Image: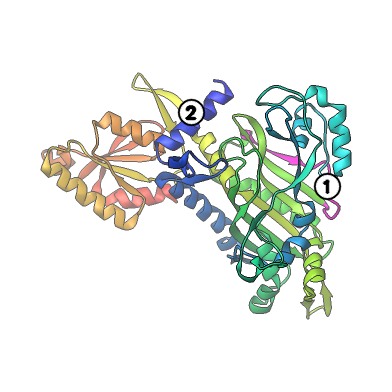
Amino acid sequence: MAAQDVMEKIVSLAKRRGFVYQGSEIYGGLAGVYDFGPRGVELLNNIKKSWWKANVYDKENYYGLDSGMFKHPKVWEASGHVGGFADPLAECRNCQHRIRVDKELANIGVAADEKMSEEQINELFDQNRDKIKCPVCGKKDFTPAMAFNLLVKSNLGDFTSEGGEPVYLPGEACQGIYLDYKNIVDTMQPKMPFGVAQIGKAFRNEISPRNFLFRTREFEQADTQLFIRPNENKEAYEAIKQDRWNWYLSLGINEKKLRFKQHENLVFYAKDAWDIEYEFPSGFDEVEGIHDRTDYDLSQHQKFSGSDLRYNDQEKGEKFIPWILETSMGMGRVFLAVLCDAYQEDEMDGETRVVLRLAPHLAPIKAAVFPLLKNKPELVEKAREIYTNLKKEIPQIMWDDNGNIGKRYRRQDEIGTPYCITIDFDTLGENPEQKDTVTVRDRDTGEQSRMPVSELAAFLKSKIQ
């Protein structure tokens, strides 16, 4: 099946089954903005819970944080976003469509380093103009490339007054960790090394959002920053890389569709940088970056703020600016990777079915409860009783009595429900040996087995944890 066909099917399923909607769809939609529907928000929250558990609860020396979205304007000067957070864009003179020059050059095998000046980018662009055509009209007549800043400007209180500094929505979520580093040191008294984890929103003025959830204008990032002593980076960095790799495997993602890719051109302050890439239908692309950032971030904020951000090691009588090992994951990209990896078409009972083979702990619905027939009050009453009791212990339980059993199974397969529980006449006691038992169907194999109602909750908990 062609890659484009697979992605179109995944996008269609995401809309049809309530995972992802186009933002502001009733007004024609807003490019690069998506809403997570009832099924999608459950899957997203389950991914977040898994990430938080792995990076906060399962670690002794990591602390959670939720920093404010608005930040002082000088934060983005210190971070380099105001001066250097830009894409080189050129405009088609025929239809006014804008292209990312560095991406178009990369598509024809010409590497454009992010450290290049506007003049250097244009020199490469001029040398290869005959190979680059507008994806809309097909012409090859472009304006020179110009830097376009990706920060989204906003208004906030006094900063809107004349002569005030502009305020931006966060271009990346991690800056809040650097800003609260001193507060965490002062209030938590952590021993070095220690980490901080945060899931936060970020916004970027993407000119050409693409590939569904892969490149959007509003997204969530899950970041960790490990603060370490200077030059104690190598062993810790390798351990972090392995730790993050293992987390993707814990999501049930096929290891053959993952790979590490090292950055060839490092920014001046970095010691090393690797991406974890997933093989989407369109090919391998980044879902997470793992960066050895030395002391750049805290040094910059110390310089611009005037605050002393040195760590005071009283036991050793030393003060130093910690180095930082960062992991930064795009939550929407991981969500998309999980969907792509889980999406399958197979044959069951002589029919082709679509199934999401989601890991049970990620599935938005853990089990669906069915009465065999919805026009039999005694079956519905018993099924409702079982459903209500299960939902008290496992919130992500669904009631489904719409259509025949076969259609219900197919519908639950499409949303990734691991187990379907059917209440039939044997449950009511027509057969004494089967009384108070139900049929439990496995999503992946289609196999069905009888189970006592009293064992259902324990069975499901053992599978989803």
In the rendered structure, find residue 266 and report the number of the disc placed on it. Answer: 1
Name the residue tied to disc 2. 9
Q: Residues within 10 Å of mark 1 (few under 14, many from 20)?
A: some
Does the image show residue 152?
A: yes
Which x, y percent locates residue 220? 58, 52
Secondary structure state at the residue bearing disc 1 = loop
Q: Quadrant of residue 198?
A: bottom right
Foreground of the two, 118 or 303: 118
Badge 2: few (under 14), some or many (20 or more) residues near its Cα, within 10 Å? Answer: some
Looking at the rendering, the stretch of residues picked out in magenta corresponds to: 257-271
Horizontal side of residue 402 vs 140, given as left or right = left
Give the structural element (helix, strand or loop) at label 2: helix
Examine the rendered structure and indicate whether residue 173 appears above or below residue 10.
Answer: below
Q: What residue is rendered at 80% in x and 69% in y?
A: 304
Q: Quadrant of residue 4?
A: top right
Residue 443, can we see it? no
